[in-house]
Structures are given as structure tokens and as C-alpha cells.
Image: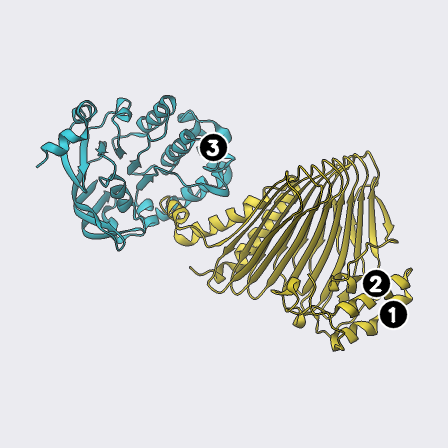
Chain colours: A cyan, B yellow
Amino acid sequence: MLKIEQLHARVKDGPEILKGIDLEIHPGEMHAVMGPNGSGKSTLSRVIAGHPDYEVTGGTVTLTGPDGPVDLLELEAHERACAGLFLGFQYPVEVPGVSNRTFLRATFNAVRRANGKPTLDPLDFDMLLNKKIEQLGMDERFIERAVNVDFSGGEKKRNEILQMALLEPQLALLDEIDSGLDVDALKAVADGVNKLRSPDNAVVLITHYQRLLDYITPDHVHIMAAGRFVRSGGSDLALEIEKRGYDWILNTAD
Amino acid sequence: MTGSLTQQTNPVLEQFEAMLPEALKESKDPAGQRAAFDMLRDCGLPHRKVEAWKYTDTSAAVAGPFDRPHHCAFALSSPDSVQLNMVETFPTIGKNDPFALLSRALSHGGLELIVPAGIVVDELVEITMPTAKEGELLCPALVIRVGAGSQVDFVIRSENQAAGSLVSFIAQVTIEENASASLTRIRTGEGACFGHFQTQQAADSRLSLFDCTVGGALTRNDFHAVLAGEGAALDMNGLYAISGREHADNHTTIEHAVPNTTSHQLYKGIMNGHACGVFNGRIVVNPGAKGTDALQMNRNLLRSRTAKVDTKPQLEISNDDVRCSHGATIGRLDEAHIFYLQSRGLDREAAEALLARGFAGEVIDLVKNSTVRETLHDLAEEFFDRSEGEVSS
């Protein structure tokens, strides 16, 4: 589904941050990318999503969907979203003056339109939205509020999950979806991610800590350091990190 | 606030003076109008060396020639509980308000609305200001009094004004003790429009003003709000959304005259094309007005490289024990916000359009009356639809 080969990237006019990433993700898989601060994990997700602050200096990123393979690096950020990619933000942006409902419907219809599917009018969209809200056990009141404005940390992250539920991406990159959450909020977010898993989609969790993985079990764990994957393994690897810290890997990596 | 107020022999002023005899003939207060014209002559029409008119060149807008019709008519939708009269006592105009003096001197008379004490008016009171046709000069006045303990919502519409016309109006709003009122003013249409507002609030009264300017070749909005009784609270919010070569100038003064009064002000501007916005907001805390709580914020969104705005928030505080803050921002849409929306599938244009609507929506949503709020949202929507082509990154 997603194939990354020898991806190199830097902050525009800055130092290189990604120094040759290789990753292959198949439908139905759950991957976790872990690593210490500054290892480049968030950069990886932003580069895949097409963040304008970064510049790809080498390598390829290919997303294969029902219509065949797409070279993501050739696409604008919104085209990548329409192709089935979703980036869950570590710090979701507040958009004052735009209601969450308006925002969600605009994005939903943009993706539908791009994929040649009919858009939904406000009434039909509300029915779908209510279904998703119920599915995720969310409070419907925050649909009326401005996007992420005065949301708690947990509400912002759950709003990201709601967007993911609506847009139904093939591949979701969730960047530190666990940061700043108390245990209840963490469980709720993890529960949402688990509910949205299907044999046809895949998720990449980007996280510093193992605790998210108590609630979501990844099929593959990749440890990132200094812009490279230094080790990959099964879910046991995350537990090992929890026990022994990143230094253990960094000191033993080749 | 004073400029070089030299005696001028000015063809524009002469044109207005030629209209004076006709205006006095219909008048119930010729002496007052004549005095106003004398003050206008002393003050002179503004030019850009006068501080209060530094960013607004009115010379083309007032050049004329103009025709002053004999009458002008208001349209009104209000319930029977609101009393209607012709204005007999006009507000006093200071010597440095040239367009208010002009309006007073060449007055077309005016409408007075009185809400008696102790009444809740549950229907929106809509006042449509007289409409100027091309080449016309109109000088209407509006006086509103809200009696003690009453509640009422007003909308004042200055719409459908024709290009090449000039409107200068005076409005006076008095809110008695413990009354609660909202007043939304909507300026759309073409031509030049000068609005001079005076508001005065008694103890424990609440007033929510919203001044919305969408379009218009030249707009100047002058507000002087006085919090004259303890416990009085004022919300003064505004939106100016302009495109092409339109110009909108907002000068507001909020005067905290007595202790323990509150004012909150948020003005937002959106400038497209070659449009030019001005915000000049003064908050004055008089000596002895302890316990004043005043917040002022002006935010501006420039949507093209050729649009501009001049903003100047000012605090003049004459004692301690007050809480005052003010600020102003000028900027373009935030790239981080744009990327967030792009990452959800919206192209850049759609992302910017949504964010700009949100920028306007944030201040419009401060309007509590839902009918008025919807009207403002619709106006903003029309503005965005027609000016989208003038946006440049």
C-alpha cells in the first residue's frame, strides 16, 4: 500500500533530517514508529503528507490504491489527502470562526469530489456525522464549536480521529496522537483508532512512549534515530524500549 | 486633534454654502444650523494634514457637484411599543467634526425612536436610512432613547446608496439606567458615507454595538461612546470588508467617564485588491474613573499584496486602578492553518476561503441576535464570493 524507498528530506534551506528511510506497509497493518525527541519521526509524517516547510532531497514515496500506484511526492498536500492519506496532527490547528460541522463537511465533500463520488448536502452529512460521533462515543456538542478552539487536549485528538473516521483514508499517519492525554482520553483515542481499523486500511502511529501501545497493538515497530530506522521488529520491541530505554538501541545499533 | 484650521475659500465649501438657504427655509432650528455651518467654515473640510484624516482623502468624494433633495425618507419596521417622532433636539457637535457639522448644517431632519422605560421589545427594530441616488447629498439624523430597564435590538441599514452620492448622518443613542440594547449598523452600497455616532450610557446599562462595513467607495465611521454611569458595560465590535479601491476608516472613542465601567472592543478588517482600511481606536479613562475594565483589539487580514491598512489603538489613562489592554495585528492567512486544511483535502484556494470566512465569522458570532447574525454572515458570504478574484498569495 505504501512504499518508501531511501527517503531523504530537509527543512527548506536547512540541515538534512531524514537520511534514507525505507518502509513498506501492507493493507490491514498497524505500524508504530518510535524514537527519542529529534529523531525525525514527526518530520517523516509531515514529509509524507506534503508539509511546505520541508524539501525532499531524494527517494520515493508510493501509495498504491484501488486505482494503482501514485507517486505521492508529485502531489500537492490536498491531492495526497484525496488520494487516501491522512495526517493526524500532534498539535491540531485552531480555526476560529469556522464551526467544526462546516469544516468537517467541507473536507469530507472535497475528498468525495476528488474521487468522483457524490457530495452530501448538510442534512445527509449530519446523519453520517451523527453516526460517526456515536460510533466513537463522542459528545455531539463540540460539533457546533469552532474547530479545535478552546478544545481540551483530549478533545482535539478525538476531533482528529473523528476526521479520520469521516475521510476513511487508506493510510493514516497519527503523529503523537497520545501526547498530552490523561489515561481516560488516551483510552478513548486508542479505542477510536482500533474501531477504524479494517483489512483495507493501514495506520502508522508515531509516538515517543510505549504507553499508547498498551491499548493498540502494532504489527510492526520501527525505532528511529538521527533520521534513520535503526531497528524494526514486532510489538515486543516496544516493550523492550519501555524497559531499557532508547539508549539501549542507540548504543547497540550498527 | 487639531489641524491647520485656516479659513478657506473653497469651491466645495461654497457649493455646500449655496445649499444653506434652502436648508434653513425648511428648518425648525435655523439658528442651530447656521451656527453649525459657521463652525464648519472655521474648521474647514478635512485634508490629510489633519491628524484625524491622515489616512483618508475625502477630496474626490466631496467634490460633487451635488444636488440636495428637499426631503429624505426613512423606512422602518418596529412594533407599536416604540414611539416615533421627528427629531427636535439635535445632538451637539464638536468643532472638529467637519462632516457631522455639515450634516447638522444641511440637515434633512431626522427620526427619533423612544423605547419607554420598563419595556421588553421582543421584535427586532429595523431602521433603513434614506437612500441617496447618484449626485445626491443627504444629511439625515437619528436619535434613539432606550428608557430605564428596557430591552431592545436595533438594526440600522445604510444600503443601496448610489455611486457618486454623499451621505453624512448623525446618530445619537442614549441608554438609560439598567437598560439593555443592541445596535447593529450595516453599511453597504456605493458612494461616500460619513457616519457620526454618539452613545451615552447610564448606570448598569448594557449596550452591544456592531458596525459592519462591506464595500463602499469611501466610508468613515466615527463613534464616540460615553460610559457615564457606574456599572455601564459596552461591547463595541466591528467588521470592515473591502475590495477594489474601496476605503473604510473607523475612528472610535470610548470614554470611561465614571468608576467601574467596562468596554470590550474587537474590530476586524479584511482588505482585498487595492482596498485600504483604517482603524483608529481611542480608549479614554477620565480622572477618577477607577475600576475601569477596557479591552481593545483590532485584527486585520490583508488578502493581496496591494491592499493596506493603518491601525492605531490608543489608551489615554488618567488614573490608577484600571485594567486596560489593547493591541492590533496585521497579517495574511497563517501557513500552518492553510496546511492543516490542505491535509484534509481542501486545495489552497478553498482552504484560504474557509479561513477568511472564519476570520470574519469570529467577530460576527459575537452578535447575539440570531436574525442579525445570519444577515451579517450572508453579507460576508456575498463579499467573499464577489471579491475572490482579487486575492493573491
Q: Is residue B13 left or right of residue A150?
A: right
Q: Is residue B37 left or right of residue B289?
A: right
Dot 3 amino acid type = Met
**Spatial CA span between label 1 and label 3:** 65 Å
Residue A19 x %, y %: 17, 46
Asked whether the residues under marks 2 and 1 belong to the same chain, the reply is yes
Whether residue A140 is visible here, answered yes or no, is yes
- Residue B276 location, quadrant: bottom right
Q: State which quarter of the image contains the C terminus of chain B.
A: bottom left
* Label 3 with label 2: CB-CB less than 8 Å: no
Q: State which quarter of the image contains the N terminus of chain B.
A: bottom right
**Residue at which label 3 appears:** A127
Q: Residue at x 16, y 38 (%)?
A: A229
The numbered mark at residue B71 is 2
Q: Residue at x 78, y 65 (%)?
A: B102
Q: Residue at x 17, y 39 (%)?
A: A24
Mark 1 neighbour density, 10 Å: few (under 14) some (14–19) many (20 or more): some
Chain under disc 3: A
Residue B74 x %, y %: 79, 55
Q: Is residue A63 above or below residue B195?
A: above
- Helix, strand or loop status at disc 1: helix
Choose mark 2 or mark 1, whichever is in front. Answer: 1
Dot 2 amino acid type = His
